[in-house]
Image (cartoon, rainbow, N blue to C red):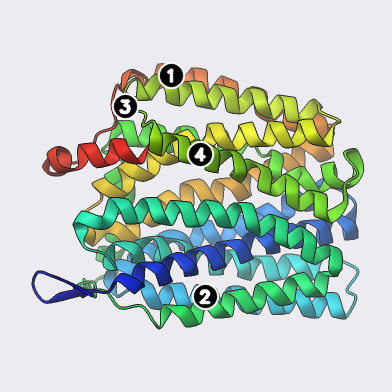
Amino acid sequence: MVVHGHGEVYRRRDLLVYLGVRFLSEAAALAQTVAIGWTIYSLSDTPLSLGIVGIAQFIPMMLLTLPAGELCDRFSPRPLAAAGFALQSLCAGAFLGLTLFHVSTPWPFYSVLLVLGSARALADPAAQALLPLLVPPEQLPRAIAGGSTAWQMAVIAGPALGGLSYALGPSVAYAGCGLAFLTAMAALAALGGRKPVPVHTDLPTGRIARITEGIEFIRSQPIVLGAISLDLFAVLLGGATALLPIYARDILKVGPAGLGMLRSAPAAGACIVAFLQTRYPLNRRVGSRLFSAVTVFGIATVVFALSRSFVASLAALVVIGASDMVSVNIRSSLVQLATPDAMRGRVSAVNMLFIGASSELGAFESGVVASMFGTVESVVFGGIGTLFVAAIWMAAFPALRKADRVHPVTQASEACCEPVVNSLI
């Protein structure tokens, strides 16, 4: 137990519990993604159905993520995270019921996905905003690194477990996911840490203004805005993962277990880069290396699209994840270390909306293009589009392109946080 000023008590076990919750909830979410992707494509046999999976989750996330972030700042992120996990568990139970009753049309599954998107809109920003309340400020950078590690481990393990459990039967996969979400929800009750200072406002216009403050904060920082928007459009266009059920079943012919491996491959590449960057921090020419990474991301996407070898496809996905990790580290470090405590929920919500919702919208884009022109053509288009975005952003955000080092955004924290930021990336 650690006491830290003004009567705030921090317990060392809280961080470990939080990391366990982060791992369990994210692994369950990704395992469920593999299961629902295979289920929907098996029922419909069309790429457009995979695009609808994305848009069904994007709509509630777009509508609810920012208000959920504002609620985190007004009250506390913990009950919102618990509510989000509870809803995700109910969705897993609904998928299980539809499977056991042998529902043969995808539309009931789409209805559950709308609820699932709402649950993610509650849980994702709340879980991210919860971490700074559990550790002293001077330990936050290390805690962020630990949270990133837990998340990446979940991104590797979750899809693989989802594919393997689905191979045993879809009911096994959905039941396991529901149990994992319930466990994560229960673990939140064991967390201590300090309580946020609630900010009350009774005026509806005041609430709307507070919701938009997170957006205004990011807009006021050109380098942060450039990095986040670059990542957004790269994810939006480079949506190869949305079409992985088609590659696994029809092109590479590796089944649901192979689908799990394909979904895990990008995270494996990301983990390798994360480990290397802790040993060899990216201290110079941050901007140019960021654009180089996005370029590699686009090229690797094209290679994956054209590959007919399972091994070569896995290798291309590893490169996709490794290159994406560069922008993820820079963006996460800037946003977390630069955000004032009273705005963490709203800024986390904007960040999650940009990245999480863009993944779902990217899935819809990929599904629509694939249904019109073909699966391979859709992924090739995404990779080439990413290359064009990188070229346009280099011209539109010269400050980001010329950035030499990663600095915290706020002047007040610049001196104390610079070494920490560099060590994280």
Chain-order first, disc 2 or disc 4 = 2
Residue 101's disc is none
Rendered location of residue 69, percent (x, y): 37, 63
Q: Nearer the viewer, residue 395 or 144?
A: 144
Q: Splitting the image into 4 quarters, where does residue 307 fall?
A: top right
Q: Which residue is mark 1?
A: 394
The residue positioned 65% from the left and 22% from the top of the image is: 299
Q: Is residue 254 left or right of residue 323?
A: right
CA–CA distance in space, label 2 to label 3: 36 Å
Q: Residues within 10 Å of mark 2 (few under 14, many from 20)?
A: many
Rendered location of residue 215, percent (x, y): 34, 48
Q: Which residue is mark 2?
A: 184
The residue positioned 30% from the left and 78% from the top of the image is: 192
Chain-order first, disc 4 or disc 3 = 4
Residue 283's disc is 3
Using the image, determine if residue 217 lies above or below residue 257. Answer: above
- Amino acid beneath label 2: Ala
Helix, strand or loop under label 4: helix
Chain-order first, disc 1 or disc 2 = 2
Q: Nearer the viewer, residue 94 or 259?
A: 259
CA–CA distance in space, label 2 to label 4: 28 Å
- Amino acid beneath label 4: Leu
CA–CA distance in space, label 1 to label 2: 41 Å
Residue 196 at least partly seen:
yes
Residue 232's disc is 4
The residue positioned 35% from the left and 20% from the top of the image is: 285
Helix, strand or loop under label 1: helix
Q: Residues within 10 Å of mark 1 (few under 14, many from 20)?
A: some
Q: Splitting the image into 4 quarters, where does residue 139 fall?
A: bottom left
Which residue sits furthest left? Answer: 6
